[in-house]
Amino acid sequence: MTEKTIYELSQPSRKGVTYPDPDVPIVPLPEGFTREELRLPELSEIDVIRHFTKLSSTNYSIDKGFYPLGSCTMKYNPKINEEMARLPNFAHTHPLQPIVSVQGNLYLMYQLQDWLEEISGFHRVCLTPAAGAQGELVGALMIKKYHQVNNHKKRVKILIPDSAHGTNPATSSMSGFKVVPVPSDERGNVDIDALKQECDDTLAGLMLTNPNTLGLFDENVEEVINLVHEAGGLVYGDGANLNALLGVFRPGDVGFDIMHFNLHKTFSTPHGGGGPGSGPVGASEALKDYLPGPVVTMIEEGDDENPPFFGFHTPEKSIGRMKSFYGHFGVLVRAFTYIAMLGAEGLRDAAEKAVLNANYLMSKVKQHYPLPFDRTCMHEFVVEGAWEDIPDIHALDISKRLMDYGFHPPTNYFPLIVHEALMIEPTETESKETLDAFAAAMKAIAKESRENPELLHHAPYNTPVRRCDEVKAARDLVLRCRIPE
Amino acid sequence: MFTPHTSQEVKEMLREIGVQTIEELFAKVPEEHRFPELVLPEGLSEIEINSELNEIASANASTDDFISFLGAGAYDHYIPAAVDMLLRRGEFYTAYTPYQPEISQGTLQAIFEFQSLMAELTGMDVSNASHYDGATAAAEAVNLAYHFFRGRRKKVLLSRSVNPQYREVIRTYMQGQENVVVSGDDENFDIVSNMDAFTERIDENTSIVIVQYPDFFGRIVDYTKLIEKAHTYGALVAFVINPTALGLIKPPGAFDVDIAVGDGQPLGIPISFGGPYLGIFTTKEKYVRKLAGRLVGETVDEDGKRAYVLTLTAREQHIRREKSTSNICTNQGLMALAATIYLSLLGKHGFKQVANLCYQKAHYAAEQISKLNNYELAFPNTPFFHEFVVKTPKPVSEINLHLQNHWILGGYDLSEVYPEYENHMLIAVTEKISRDDIDDFVAALEEVGHD
């Protein structure tokens, strides 16, 4: 049974919430501007509660089960994070209150900047970017401005490995750069010879995800960075896969110039069904003055009697403001909570267990699926969801069938350099039993693919809806509810 | 913490992998940089972090402590209890982006309903699944126009009464595009007193004109002529809106604008020190293929049952890569859900009521303040919604310090961003403020206004 929409549930004159009558004298509404029609639904509170509760029950979620989505780091979202972000003295503070009345917020942000700097090896972190893609935009604009300020007019080219997320090239062209892809070599590293070819005086920079989207730590990372630096370019680190590196490796230590963090991946803040994310950006000593504003600084150091006093500051050569106010503060509180609970030891443990889980699962899954890059992986790995002897079965079929076994499918058809890719990231918060159950399902599906391929083509069967007609959706384009007369 | 592995399991897993220790798995990490000693505080238990964060939070004062007249882009409205109860459902907030429709119908239908509500509210044809906030939605409007004219029209016109932070963000975003000139918001060039001069600036090189409705000063301005002129030259017009106001005043669609953007924070989202908020983006049908961000469309499943999917994904970065018009990937899914629940609860009646309460109380406050000696309304002849500007006898910062002693958060000091508005306070009034609160505020203003 399809759940009705809020407009289909609507009944004239129903109310979900009441408000008091005005306690002030009534004045007329502005002439010529008064709205006549306002088609909003009319529902009672219980209608609303039942509707959204029903909708929620048709969602898969981390709280329901295993989410091996490569490059998305779907780790458990601790409940205490949610409680802390809702503390009234955080949630009910206005962004334009006098600085003196929000010193708690500023302290928290200052401390989080400091911790992210320590974790990544960068000199300065700005917390404002709204999400990873916005962090990337910050990075690309910083590279642009750096070359402008230094009068490097010819530097218009950004190199992007062919394994990169789509946001990398999109960001670069949005920033006015020419995008040049760099191939990967047979071990999944950046192809050094191809890179050298592109290292000329038009090079503005390189965007590098390490570990890359194959889950592989680039074996030549230092050489790659040196080549780009020697050619006068800058290196941007896409921090999407930072979970593998906590307490293991600091990108800032080997010469990355700029990097974004994804607090909603690495630092356990929830994905929220597609956001809000949070994408702070770290910069090296040489690039820190180009960061967006504002960043939190300590204006006065404290002493025995007085706590330190914090304020906002916009860096000297800043690319400017990226969004309203200071970033996704509520998300920052959650990430702060997580880091404070883990400490250095817990962070390293998270990275280690993430890598342990990935290698364990890879070892199990590769028994049944082709593994194009067969070497120790970091936090994720990529197998092919296809076999030469059953050309009819695709990664999509396997993904859909996994739902019948109660699992969220892996990221599929990405990275683009792997044929029929299934990109699997188990994260550290999953137990061995869960991994074993997933591996068993993958094995069973491999068997079904040979014995009953037709079964897979029409999977899933046990989900709230079955395969959806995406062609029809794009062709007929219904983007809003029909409103019953 | 949060890793469930027993030491026995770790051993079994290492054996399966074929290594002795976990450290061996990191052999490819350059040795001299492997396992750095991080200087961080010792990890805390839940009970400890709870008390530490309560202590940090206690160094703030909140709008629970103060009566707040602060708006300027973030508004302290009442949020019905049911909103957060539903948002706390793990099935919503621990879900990923709904790329797999078979197991994401909840998120998809909620976004579809969100799109419907936003389109209805703004009177526009279509809405996307949201942007980061109002400022970035405004920047994406400029981006859309830039791409619509394939980069050939270089001029972007902004009214000075568009939220100053939005204007900053637009400029940041446009740095990447060659030769785009953003102008129209020069100091002292107020759109209301210079409407003709502003409109004169629209020409065949203009890609988009952005104005705010109600504007940053709360004024409800008639932009009809400006829109006509822009359309004569083929330029797009975007309104920056406040959703609450649209419960009462004509929607942007009624003025034939091309794009309406705004911040959805007033729709059930806490002010939370500036984020996360919700970027609203609605437009005409003809721009739908240029629209950035996610879109949910209705379709059917294999059994012919109604279902929802992400659609027109070929516009987006993960398909088009460097050819996409925007790099946007995440939306503000959970915030869009909050707005959807909020509007479902308030409905037609409640939403109008809230808008009217804001309007009436703001007008009462303005009336009372205008009666005070030494204070006057800055724009006495322009209609306004729930925000208005008052000329004060002293610097606003000084007045606000005094108000704090009365547990009142005064309005926004406009001189911080508008040099021409020294001693001008922008005051916002929502339905949470009572007549008594307003009377106290007025009395405190009177007290500090003397001498």
Image (cartoon, rainbow, N blue to C red):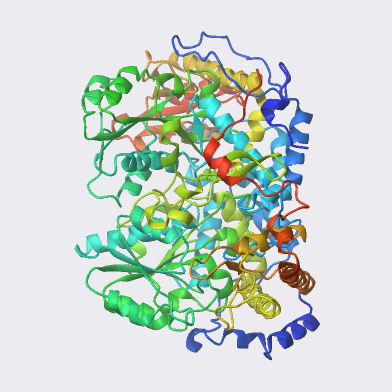
Rendered location of residue B119, percent (x, y): 53, 29
Direction from residue A380 to residue B161 in the image, left or right:
left
Relative height, residue A476 to residue B151 (above, below)? above
Measuring from the top left, give residue A217's x and y in whole percent: 51, 79
Q: Residue at 50% x, 32% y: name it.
A: B126
Does the image show residue A175? yes
Relative to residue B103, is residue B37 drawn left or right?
left
Compare residues A378 and B350 and report the one nearer the observer: A378
Query: Would residue B68 be visible to someone looking at this image?
Result: no
Work out whether residue B308 or residue A66 is closer to the camera in this orientation and state it: B308
Question: As displayed, is residue A52 above or below residue A184?
Answer: above
Indicate the position of residue B135 as horizontal and vertical percent values: 43, 41
Q: Nearer the viewer, residue B77 or A71?
A: A71
Examine the image and state in which quarter residue A160 appears: bottom left
Image mark count: 0
Instruction: Report the residue at 30% width, 52% height from top.
Output: B176
Q: Nearer the viewer, residue A394 or A8?
A: A394
The quarter holding residue B148 reads: top left
Measuring 38% from the left and 15% from the top, which residue is drawn there? B382
Residue at image location 43% in from the left, 76% down from the top: A184
Q: Is residue B331 above or below residue A339?
A: above
| The C terminus of chain B lies in quadrant | top left
Furthest toward the bottom, the residue is B20
Placement of the N terminus of chain B among the 4 image quadrants: bottom right
The correct choice, above or below, for A270 with respect to A437 in the image is: above
Q: Position of residue A130 (x, y in %)?
A: 49, 51
